[in-house]
Amino acid sequence: MTWTYSGDPSDSDRDAVRFLVGDTDVDAQKVQDAEIAWALTEEGNIYLAAAAIATAIGAKFTERVNKSVGDLKIEFSKQRDQYNDLAEKLRLRGATRAGRPYAGGISKDDKRTVRDDTDRVLPAFKKGMHDRDPSVRDSRTIEDELLS
């Protein structure tokens, strides 16, 4: 199994996920590169992948029990809770990055850009689509003329 970290989260998505979950110490490795690669393929962005990894790290502490010997206490449940809290924060952050809302027609330049885009799917409805063409006579007009 491989564990790598360049120290630059902008270098790769894997390093960004490691940075977000705090798995940056070579002497205290928490997850392997392959696990992060899997999370990145399953999730929509680095924040959701980091949330999945944080949840997985927290799950590792679930199977460990709290221990105390005299005044020394090791509380794995606190570590589990911290990783679960981190996962929730990352999930919220990832959800806001999943898609960005767009409101068209706000600026004249935006309207021109959309109108001039030749690859754009034409709208099904448009302004004036039901306006009557004066050169076309409908059947009622023809019947009225015949009856008079």
Image: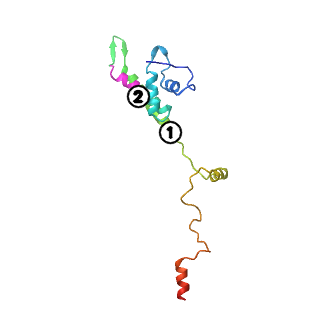
Question: Which amino acid is tagged 1?
Answer: Ala
For label 2, the residue is 55
Numbered range of the magenta stretch = 56-64
Residue in the foreground of this view, choosing between 28 and 114: 114
Separation of marks 2 and 1 at Cα, in angstroms: 19 Å
The mark that comes first in sequence, 2 or 1, is: 2
For label 1, the residue is 98
Q: Is residue 62 left or right of residue 20?
A: left
**Residue at the location (54% across, 84% down)?**
144
Would you say the magenta stretch is mainly helix, strand or loop? Answer: helix
Residue in the foreground of this view, choosing between 141 and 74: 141
Cβ atoms under marks 2 and 1 closer than 8 Å: no
Kindly report which numbered mark, 2 or 1, lies closer to the viewer in this rendering: 1
Q: Is residue 89 above or below residue 63?
A: below
User: Residue 142 in magenta?
Assistant: no
Looking at the rendering, in which quadrant would you find the C terminus? Answer: bottom right
Q: Is residue 35 above or below residue 97?
A: above
User: Residue 63 in magenta?
Assistant: yes
| Residue 115, image x, y percentages | 63, 53
- In the rendered structure, find residue 47 and report the number of the disc placed on it: none
Q: Is residue 139 left or right of residue 60?
A: right
Under tag 2, what secondary structure?
A: helix
Q: Is residue 24 above or below residue 134?
A: above
Query: Quick check: can you spot residue 58?
Result: yes
The tally of labels here is: 2
Q: Is residue 55 above or below residue 1?
A: below
